[in-house]
Amino acid sequence: MEQVIISTSKTEKGFSASCELLPGWVVAFTGSFSDFINYVKESIVFYVDCAKADGDPYPAIFDTNYELLFKMNIQSLLYCYDKILTRAALSRMTGINQRQLGHYICGRSKPRKPQSEKIVSALHNLGKELQAITT
């Protein structure tokens, strides 16, 4: 199954997305990230249906089974998980203090590349640990 990368950013009240494969396609959504995912899927189907109806070209990948891969910036990623992971837990995982994490989440500052890598690495490690759990 091929992957379609959706560039995702946090907006003041929700999320926005774009995709290099779909020129001019940009969506913005107010609400939760899970609802945003559904909105993006519906919007892509609508885009492709309109292109077919108008005889306009569109990427062939949308005629096959594909998977959406949401590529987030750090602010979007942290905002998404702010209600799931406490800032204290994230601070312990990353070594970045809670106040600085709050600045990243609110968009008051952007992390430098090493800080971004710490955050992503910590979340990947958490995911690996969770996958290793058996019942």
Image (cartoon, rainbow, N blue to C red):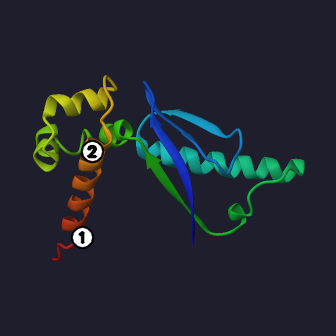
Q: In which image quadrant can residue 110 be found?
A: top left
* x, y percent for residue 39: 56, 44
Local packing at callout 1 (Cα closer than 10 Å; few below 14, some 14-19, many 20+) is few
Whether residue 32 is situated above or below residue 119 in the rendered picture: above
At 34% from the left edge and 26% from the top edge, which residue is drawn?
107
Residue at the image position 16 percent from the left and 41 percent from the top: 86
Q: Quadrant of the C terminus?
A: bottom left
Q: Nearer the viewer, residue 125 or 83?
A: 125
> Among all residues in the image, which is located at the extreme bottom?
135
**Residue beneath disc 1:** 131
To which quarter of the image does residue 88 belong?
A: top left
Is 124 or 42 nearer to us in this picture?
124
Tags 2 and 1 touching, CB below 8 Å: no
Q: Nearer the viewer, mark 2 or mark 1?
A: 2
Residue located farthest toward the right when viewing the structure as drawn = 55
How many numbered circles are shown? 2
Amino acid under disc 1: Gln
* Residue bearing the label numbered 2: 114
Q: Marks 2/1: CA distance?
A: 26 Å
Q: Name the spot of residue 122 as percent of width and height, x first.
A: 21, 54
